[in-house]
Image (tube, rainbow, N blue to C red):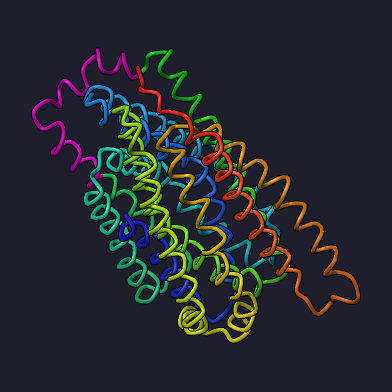
Amino acid sequence: MILSNITVPLLGMVDTAVIGHLPHAYYLGGSTVGAMIITFITWLCGFLRMSTTGLAAQALGRQNNDDATLVLLRGLLVAAAIGLVCIVLQNPYFQLSLWLAGGSEQVQFYAKQYMDIRVWGLPAALANIVMLGWLLGQHQAKAVMWLLILINSINLSLDLLFVLAFNWQVQGVAAATLVAEYSGLIAGLGFILHRYYQASISQLFSRQVLADVMNVSQLAAYFKLNRDILIRTLCLEVCFVFMTFQGARLGDNVVAANAILMNFLLLISFGLDGIANAAEAMIGKAKGAGANNELALILKRCTLWTIVFALAYSLAFALAGDWLINQITSITDVRTEAKKYLGWIMLLPLIGCWCYLYDGVYVGMTRADIMRNSMIVATFAVFFPLWWLFQSLFSQPLFLQISLNHALWLAFSGFMLARGATLGWHLYSRLLPQPIATPQ
């Protein structure tokens, strides 16, 4: 799962590097704002993966293949519906998002170019989220790895072709992602049908199965679980979008520098999420089987590896952070700006690793309500108050030499720390002392 996950931010770093070597910062700023507006939707729909993983793992623990099938089909149905709605409503969504984003005229122009292409890939992107979550819940981590490697290899190859050979600039990056998303959809569906339903495809789409997928009570339970994950993810996305938009308002160089640093953050989070994803699958299976004694052992093992990888990430960015920034962009002003805030990236693995791990525990337990509450506290009681306090402080004459962008990164670090602290408090004081309830 670690190998699978890090292909995503590594591709993002390649995207950034390809655009970062174009002659102006606004190319990188525009693609960053456009990507954030599109990925706001895909990340917001992260509930599709989380709930699918938890439910599929519990079905595996109960050895109930019919339930696993319903989880997959229900997720794909919801993904297709959301993707089509987004395509229909793209114009008002783009206009509102760009108005909120601000930034220079050039940043807005290239952001719109990027979004006009990427929006057509949303149905495939959301279906891929469901399939990857389902395969993980079925303990098919190698299949997840190869599928992600396929998607990102196609994306990378087309990035280089479209941008460097065809000179399509920002549109080339967007087109490469579009093709890769539909390639992943075809490959994922092909693997699942061959691996699980080769002899029973007709039964998979039978009238009875489709009726079960649309069962009102089951849909209600599904959307209740997803509602809590949606609220949790919405809070997270508000913080990411706020950082991108505020960076755009601080200038083209700042938003471009933050784009580089956010790629570093994603490399950290996706790598640590590999351990969390493993925890999701193992804890979900243990819950489905009613294996109460396994939870503490799984958590102990995952905690050990989380600490090891968090320390490794911090050390890696301390030793190679400057070099990585220089490889990603050739624009001197953007390099200088990004290096001002590299210390936050060195710190974040150590203070943020806990929220990734504990999210995995609660996804496996399908306790999205706890994740929701933690995220609400971290967002509205920590992130925004810290940002308001320190941007006001750094605006005072005594602190004018301190960039307002430091207030953004300080607030985000406090936000990550608060997520881990609240989830950890609940886990060790409330959840672990209780036995796992075996699903009926």
Image point (56%, 64%), residue name: 348
For residue 329, above or below residue 163: below
Segment tinted magenta in the rendering = 186-213
Question: Residue 113: x and y, percent?
Answer: 53, 59
Residue 211 in magenta? yes
In the figure, is residue 167 to the left or right of 321? left
Residue 370 in magenta? no
For residue 209, above or below residue 137: above
For residue 7, above or below residue 71: below
In the figure, is residue 82 to the left or right of 340? left
- Residue in front for this viewpoint, 53 or 245: 53
Magenta stretch: dominant secondary structure? helix
Image point (73%, 65%), residue name: 407
In the figure, is residue 130 to the left or right of 61? right
- Residue in front for this viewpoint, 185 or 301: 301
Image point (12%, 25%), residue name: 200
- Residue in front for this viewpoint, 37 or 338: 338
Question: Residue 184: x and y, percent?
Answer: 28, 49
Q: Residue furthest right?
A: 397
Image point (55%, 31%), residue name: 369
Where, quadrant-wise, is the N terminus in this rendering? bottom left
Question: Residue 293: x and y, percent?
Answer: 34, 35
